[in-house]
Image: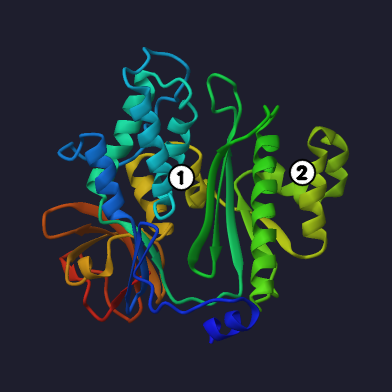
Amino acid sequence: MVISKLSSEFPMSDLGPLSFFLGIAASRSKSGLFLSQSAFAQEILARADMVSCNPCSTPADTKTKLAVDGEPVSDPTLYRSLAGALQYLTFTRPDIAYAVQQVCLFMHDPRLPHFNALKRILRYLKGTLSHGLHIKASAVDRLVAYSDADWAGCPTTRRSTSGFCVYLGDNLVSWSSKRQHVVSRSSAEAEYRGIANVVAETAWLRNLLLELYCPLSRATVVFCDNVSAMYLASNPVQHQRTKHVEIDLHFVRERVAIGHVRVLHVPSAYQYADIFTKGLPTSLFLDFRNSLNIRLPPDQTTGITIYPTKVVGLKTPLSITIEVVDGVGRKSMMLVEVVEEVAVVEKEVEVADSGYRWL
């Protein structure tokens, strides 16, 4: 039906079910559509001569920020080639978007600390080669966005890093990690600039859905973890004190006034956009990565053993965070939902158990 409607508006031809396009492999299953660039990731590792490297659990360090220091790299062309390839890989791997954005800031003059950060990304990819973006059947009646900013995070320029992710229904459809163009004088200003960016993105998505005959009747909900930025979006009195960000203020305020956007507060523990603005501890990173629908292929998760580790709901259906161990002993965290009245036990349970389904 969708193809026939598009054909009536645009000249197009049906090439059959999608399987491979511009280096992105697409596989269908009962759980949805799985997009992966594992072959391209392996090619990047081979180009860097790191096929046999030791994997690591996260792509970015939590303690240090990259700056303009250290010895120049011996082969800057290789650095630029790898960084550019990683940029393309973020099409299906938003979990590395922040780390890739950081190393791309220094492509003009790469130093050894920057190359070490790039190698860490490659080591992370080594351990997650089979992961990809999972898209499942979901209603397309709402847009939900998360916005965050790392205020003055750049040690060289003191500019902030903005990040956001946008969900259409239950699926991730847009994300970004980008350094802001100007220095923000407060954390609220940095957060509000980030909100303005995601509101612009959601406005474009709403117009796109309208052109595809899927107009949204609900307001887009934008979550941020800064209370001051949330108040600025809805309280016009506050605008008189913040003329230095006047354009962004009026833009977001206009969208809120006409009912297209609602800006709400979210606790930092559930601020998924954090993964696009800073390096995170392993447990939090894995939790947020699952929220982005970055997972193993469906055929690699059937029948594997799971270990319930934390209950995050009290009623059925409830969600539990689980530790997944595959056939070769690799561990990763995933989210599963209890859809029947079953007890959460401490012993091993199978994914194929009818009491569970993947989120």
Element assignment for label 1:
helix
Residue closest to the eye, 132 or 260: 132
Residue 186: x percent and y percent?
69, 30
Q: Residue 319 is drawn in which quadrant?
A: bottom left
Q: Which residue is mark 1?
A: 275
Which residue lies at the image location 39% right of the left edge and 51% below the top edge? 93
Residue 357: x percent and y percent?
32, 75
Which comes before the other along the chain, label 1 or label 2?
Answer: 2
Which residue lies at the image location 49% right of the left edge and 76% below the top edge? 138
Label 2 CA crowd tier, 10 Å (few <14, some 14–19, many 20+):
many
Question: As shown in the figure, which amino acid type bears the numbered disc 2?
Answer: Asp
Looking at the image, residue 2 sits to the left or right of residue 236; the answer is: left
Q: Which residue is mark 2?
A: 248
Vertical placement of residue 67 versus 15, above or below: above
Vertical placement of residue 279 versus 294, above or below: above
Element assignment for label 2:
helix
Label 1 CA crowd tier, 10 Å (few <14, some 14–19, many 20+):
many
Residue 105: x percent and y percent?
50, 29
Looking at the image, residue 280 sits to the left or right of residue 223; the answer is: left
Residue 234 visible somewhere in the drawing? no
Question: As shown in the figure, which amino acid type bears the numbered disc 1?
Answer: Ile
Q: Any mark on residue 84, and which?
A: none
Which residue lies at the image location 69% right of the left edge and 73% below the top edge? 210
